[in-house]
Image (cartoon, grey):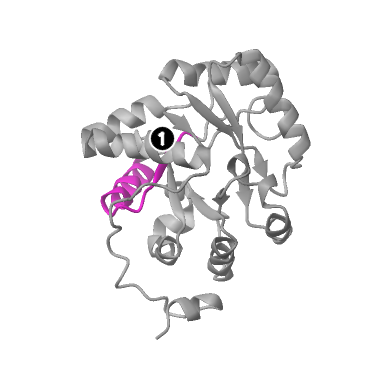
Amino acid sequence: MIEIHYHLLYGVDDGPRDLAASLALAEASIAEGVTHIVATPHANFRYGFDPSLNRAKLEELNQRLTGRVTLGLGCDFHLSIENVADAFEHPAEYTINGGRYLLVEFPDFAIPPNFSDVLYKFTLRGIVPIVTHPERNPVLLTKPELMKPWIRCGCLVQITAASLVGKFGGRAQSFCHQILKKNWVHLVASDAHSVDRRPPMMEPACKSLTKAYGSETAERLCTVNTRAVFEGQALPEQPEPQDLDDYLPSRPHGILSMLFPR
């Protein structure tokens, strides 16, 4: 299994507070059978995002873990004006391992229409946005149809391992299965923050997927697709997403009016 959304670096956000906590978190994932971890500190208004510091902390962890797990670097990217402008100019500072994939987290209370334009503009620059944990977003829980144009223009969707096994409540778990059945999900990741508070749960999530959808689906979402993201490669052919072709935005906005003409 490969982790592509994971708060491993200590002292940079709401993840581990010190080196010992970071190492304990990594050990928990190694024990689950995880072979690769992308450290993805928050890039938002609350925490300072320093790529040089992040690289230094990642190298420190690499030295301490002595090759027992392969580490990479990305970020948990928030769609602020400043972040978007800088990411357009310096995409490798934000994308996973400097490649084509970018984890994107949406605000909890409102998703402005122009966010769809931003996601599409990223794809025009060769960057593939990964919409993170929609099952934990209050807006998307009530309006999952907002995700349709994002998926249609090439965005990927990542759900949280703990959500699949009910740790974020029944509503989040039900939403995961709702979009899994429509083939809207491309990736599973733990979004781990600490051993105690937000532990990695890839192993139970993978078992849950295997039971509900079969081993091929579990392998695709937890290892095959996540490996492609880690390595910056194109995903292999995916199952056709359902319930997208009948959807047109009620009010096409900006670029979307050209994507989805009346």
In this view of the protein, which residue sits in the foreground, 170 or 140? 140
In this view of the protein, which residue sits in the foreground, 90 or 15? 90
Q: In which image quadrant can residue 153 be found? A: bottom left
Q: Secondary structure at mark 1?
A: helix
Identify the residue at image location x=34%, y=72%: 247
Q: Position of residue 219 (x, y in %)?
A: 32, 34
Q: Is residue 23 left or right of residue 60?
A: left
| Amino acid identity at mark 1 | Ala
| Residue 140 visible in image | yes
Q: Read off the residue under disc 1.
A: 161
Total labels drawn: 1
Q: Position of residue 39 (x, y in %)?
A: 60, 33
Question: Which quarter of the rendered picture does the C terminus lie within?
Answer: bottom left
The part of the chain drawn in magenta is 170-190
Q: Position of residue 49 (x, y in %)?
A: 74, 42
The correct choice, above or below, for 12 with respect to 246 in the image is: above
The correct choice, above or below, for 33 with respect to 240 in the image is: above
Identify the residue at image location x=45%, y=23%: 34
Identify the residue at image location x=76%, y=40%: 50
Q: Position of residue 83 (x, y in %)?
A: 70, 55
| Residue 10 visible in image | no
Q: Is residue 260 left or right of residue 242?
A: right
The correct choice, above or below, for 79 with respect to 174 in the image is: below
